[in-house]
Image (spheres, helix red, strand yellow):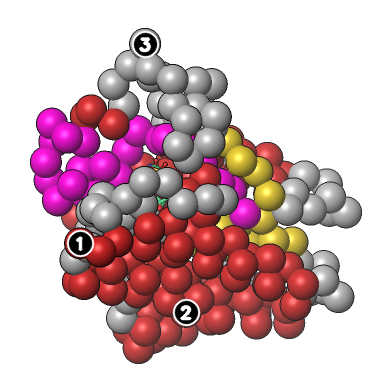
Amino acid sequence: MKPIAMITGATSGIGLACAEKFHKAGYRVIITGRNVAKLNELKDKWGEDAYPLIFDVRDRDIAIMAIKSLPPTWQEIDVLINNAGLALGLDPEFAGDYTDWDTMIDTNIKGLLTVTREVVPGMIARGKGHIINIGSVAGDAAYANGNVYCATKAAVKAITDGLRIDVAHTPLRVTLLKPGLVETNFSNVRFHGDDERADNVYKGIKPLVGDDIADAALYAAQATAHVQIAEMLILATHQANGSVIVRS
Ligand code: NDP
Ligand code: 8X3
């Protein structure tokens, strides 16, 4: 039987690239998200090897129900990629938008925790599993106007480290991937659909693409069983950290 990878936010960017990469590597993929049309398109493409689960990670009851609704043949998840997340706004902390803050906290922190809480017990019971959380260079140190988004990714780092400690007595492995600039829909979402502002984020630098992060996820998942890739910081060549980006 093929192994199963579950990827949250599989409809775009890094999550979509992970779904494609793991599917190509021989995994069956549970693809989750809110974009029903995109999930159905992937299901049509991958047939029996894909199982779409439609839920918003912020809606805890629905998320729990969706995960519990997995048919027996899809319950034994080998790899969980907690990817669904977003930034909203880039403003000084004293001028931030309350709704944007709540959405980031509810998605990046609370949503990730819900999915983890639902999936990991089965992994522990089976004595097998790998959790890969998508953090960010933004979680290493705050950058100007990044405040709350950076805080959510610092929380992802702490939550990932905590889980690694809590499952250290089991065969489970826990990985944190911390990408820098990756050209996806991320900046269009951050700037509420302002495409010009979003495009400027990637001007004068060759950014990473989703596939670069999917490569790292697959590398961690395929490492031999006694090797736990605990953390990877993945940056474009001309990015040094969250604040230093050298543009031509
Ligand atoms: P995209 O906007 O391209 O993809 C984000 C994905 O998350 C989409 O599938 C989106 O679905 C999903 N998502 C967002 N909110 C929810 C929600 N409430 N419930 C379910 N799914 C949701 O951005 P990226 O691929 O770049 O982002 C993926 C992750 O990578 C995020 O956690 C982000 O913080 C992180 N990251 C991104 C970096 C970058 O530079 N791009 C760098 C470092 C980390 P929908 O289409 O329904 O909104
Ligand atoms: C996304 C990367 O640097 O825009 O987490 O915050 S950054």
Residue kind at label 1, given as amino acid type: Ala
* Along the line of sight, the residue nearer the viewer: 223 or 1: 223
Residue under pointer 1? 95
Residue 228: mark = none
Quadrant position of residue 95? bottom left
Mark 2 vs mark 1, foreground winner is 1
| Mark closer to the chain start, 2 or 1 | 1
Element type at marker 1? helix
Q: Report crowding for label 1: few under 14, some 14 to 19, many 20 or more residues within 10 A (C-alpha).
A: few
**Chain part drawn in magenta:** 176-198
Element type at marker 3? loop
* Along the line of sight, the residue nearer the viewer: 69 or 139: 139
- Residue at the far front: name it: 94
Residue kind at label 3, given as amino acid type: Ser
Identity of the residue drawn at 53% across and 50% down:
141
Identity of the residue drawn at 44% across and 20% down:
246
Instruction: Mark 2 and mark 3 in contact? Answer it, CB < 8 Å.
Output: no
| Mark closer to the chain start, 2 or 3 | 2
Mark 2 CB near ligand 1 (8 Å cut):
no
Residue under pointer 3? 248
Identity of the residue drawn at 52% across and 45% down:
137
Residue 114: mark = 2
Q: x and y percent of residue 173 in the render?
A: 74, 61
Q: x and y percent of residue 201 in the render?
A: 29, 31
Q: Report crowding for label 2: few under 14, some 14 to 19, many 20 or more residues within 10 A (C-alpha).
A: some
Residue 143 in the figure: left or right of residue 119: left
Instruction: Mark 3 and mark 1 in contact? Answer it, CB < 8 Å.
Output: no
Q: CA distance from mark 2 to mark 1?
A: 30 Å
Residue 86 in the figure: left or right of residue 166: left
> Where's the N terminus, which quadrant?
bottom right
Q: Report crowding for label 3: few under 14, some 14 to 19, many 20 or more residues within 10 A (C-alpha).
A: few
Residue kind at label 2, given as amino acid type: Thr
